[in-house]
Image (tube, rainbow, N blue to C red):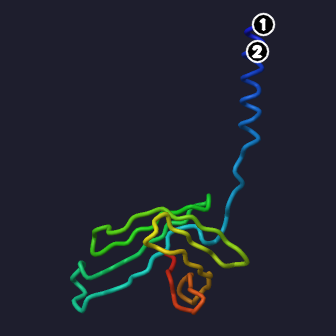
């Protein structure tokens, strides 16, 4: 009797795990996006470069980094969702407020733009 219950439990676990597949997400925003905020007058001075980076993954989550020079000054997770072509990025820390962007293409690169038309980030 124990063998029968063990066998049925194994079959139930295998059956349940096969039913819980995550659908593929092929959204065009997936990947790494970046934005350079400040560059000092001396281009060789890396400490004056402030750079942001967003890594979008396929489960509607991502990782945000802000660098000054080669040092990370902010590192946090974010979630994202898309509604009617507009992407909403919500950060895990209160210091960064949510932002809404739209994806556009230029001759050179894919862009994320704010509703005002200002470039938010470019695809790497």
| Residue located farthest toward the top when viewing the structure as drawn | 1
Q: For mark 2, does the 10 Å Cα neighbourhood hold few (<14), some (14 to 19), or many (20 or more) residues?
A: few
Quadrant showing the N terminus:
top right
Front residue of 97/35: it is 97
Q: Residue at x 76, y 41 (%)?
A: 19
Q: Quadrant of residue 3?
A: top right
Residue that label 2 marks: 5
Q: Residue at x 75, y 17 (%)?
A: 7
Residue 106, percent from left and from top? 58, 89
Q: Residue at x 49, y 80 (%)?
A: 121
Q: Secondary structure at mark 1?
A: loop
What is the crowding at mark 1: few (fewer than 14 residues within 10 Å), some, or many (at least 20)? few
Report helix, strand or loop for mark 2: helix
Q: Are the residues tagged 2 and 1 within 8 Å (C-beta)?
A: yes
Mark number for residue 39? none
Which residue is label 1 attached to? 1
Q: Nearer the viewer, residue 97 or 7?
A: 97
Image coordinates for residue 14, horizontal then vertical, percent:
73, 31
Image vertical order of residue 38 relative to residue 60, above or below: below
What's the CA distance linking mark 2 and mark 1?
6 Å
Position of residue 29 in the picture relative to residue 55 (left or right) = right
Looking at the image, is 70 positioned above or below residue 60?
Answer: below
Give x and y (percent) for residue 116: 57, 92
């Amino acid at each position: 009797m124990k063998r029968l219950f063990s066998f049925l439990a194994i079959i139930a676990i295998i059956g349940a795990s096969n039913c819980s597949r995550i659908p593929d997400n092929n959204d065009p925003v997936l990947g790494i996006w970046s934005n350079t905020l400040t560059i000092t007058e001396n281009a060789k001075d890396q400490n004056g470069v402030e750079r942001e980076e967003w890594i979008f993954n396929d489960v509607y989550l991502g990782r945000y980094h802000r660098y000054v020079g080669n040092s990370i000054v902010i590192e946090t997770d974010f979630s994202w969702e898309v509604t009617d072509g507009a992407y909403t990025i919500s950060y895990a820390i209160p210091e960064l407020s949510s932002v809404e962007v739209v994806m556009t293409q230029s001759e050179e690169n894919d862009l994320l733009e704010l509703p005002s038309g200002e470039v938010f980030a470019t695809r790497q």
